[in-house]
Amino acid sequence: MTRFALIIDDDPDFRELLSGLLSAHGYSCTESEGLQDIACNSGRLEADLILVDYELGDFTGDDVLNYLRERNVEAGIILMSACHSSEMGTMVDRGRRGGLNMLGQLGKPFDLKHLASMLNNLKLHHNPLTVGELDDALSQQQLHLVYQPKIDLGCGKLTGAEALVRWQHPLRGMVMPNQFITLAERSHRIDQLTWQVLDQGFRQQTLWRKQGLNLNLALNLSPELLRTRDMLKNLDALASEHDIDPHSITLELTESCGIDCLTYARHLLNAIRERGYRLALDDFGTGFSSMMQLYNLPFDELKIDQCFVGRSDSHPEARAITRTIVELGQRLNLAVVGEGIETSEQRDYLRDTQCNIGQGYLFARPLAVEAFNAWHHQPPIAVSELAAPKAATRHVNI
């Protein structure tokens, strides 16, 4: 079967060289000079593999990756550059968190064996996940949670954690949510998946409480659950089974979750809040229904999407939007959480805006329970620095 590759690089000689190498691996190649070219010819994105150079004249590989994310591209992506590998690694991680299938990075000049290894990995994972595999995952407990710490930006105290689902596939290895959540939604398994996530999260919260670790645990709530009968009854039963205090749980809904009946959703979410649960609007600022949902639904917390936080130390527009969201939350008496903090400059800027809570790779990646417990006893310097007087932190001006 013919596989298709798109090479995005402004050097025609390099494109020709790479095209020849990929052809030897069975790829039919299309070449592009940069973002303008693919934006005007979006049909080229229908590829199995996309290779993106980081330096593209007026645009960067970051611009291209943002465009690919906006177009929900599912191809395997390799980022190429002659710049320092740590910068490349940061870009690859950011792409993965944005839902892209990042295969890795390729330096210039590149290692042919490394390229061949990434191509082989793509070939092994090329077959899409099936509903049968997802059913096996749900029935055989292949799904598990990892936990990312949430930090009080005012004092550096660990205040909570966000639970994130992972799939340990027996053949494919670790499968990330962006690879199976859509399948679960399309196949009407998202309710079952969400209940498993809530069950695991509640169980872990009970264990932490017994160990003397009192945290607020954030769990993602699928909007599909709001459409099911007996949702509140089942939630009450699960909380009773695990002896959960609802005040220790935050349920997060993404702003792009597509709630189609705000009146009914408001009734249901009010009932959830009356039980003591906190409600958070996740990924705020990335969808078209933000203000309508914020106006109509009873949230306690706003989470600033990482696409703004992650650029707040380098893009004035992102800084301005981040500050505006924080101020909006303050005016509405909502707690505000900044997601995707990667640098101390981003952390300090959020602190200066009086954003309440922060989470991101600067503090910790999502951790298995054992690693989370160890992290709690010895947090990194990026956390302990928050305990210093505010005047001692670095400031980023807009």
Image: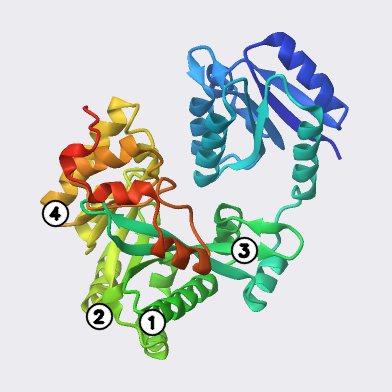
- Residue under numbered circle 2: 275
Q: CA distance from mark 2 to mark 1?
A: 10 Å
Q: Do residues under tags 2 and 3 come within 8 Å of each other at their CB atoms? A: no
Which labelled disc corresponds to residue 235? 1
Callout in the foreground (4, 3):
3
Q: Do residues under tags 1 and 3 come within 8 Å of each other at their CB atoms? A: no
Callout in the foreground (2, 3):
3
| Residue at 34% from the left image edge and 79% from the top image edge | 212
Instruction: Give the amino acid type for the residue marked by disc 4 in the picture.
Output: Leu
Residue 55, quarter of picture: top right
Which labelled disc corresponds to residue 332? 4
Q: CA distance from mark 1 to mark 3?
A: 23 Å
- Residue under numbered circle 3: 167
Q: At which x and y percent is residue 381?
A: 37, 48
Callout in the foreground (1, 3):
3
Q: In screen coordinates, is 340 left or right of 196?
A: left
Query: Callout 2: 10 Å neighbours few (<14), some, many (20+)?
Result: some
Q: Secondary structure at mark 2?
A: loop
| Residue at 20% from the left image edge and 51% from the top image edge | 154
- Residue 68 seen in render: no
Quarter placement of the N terminus: top right
Instruction: Give the amino acid type for the residue marked by disc 3 in the picture.
Output: Trp
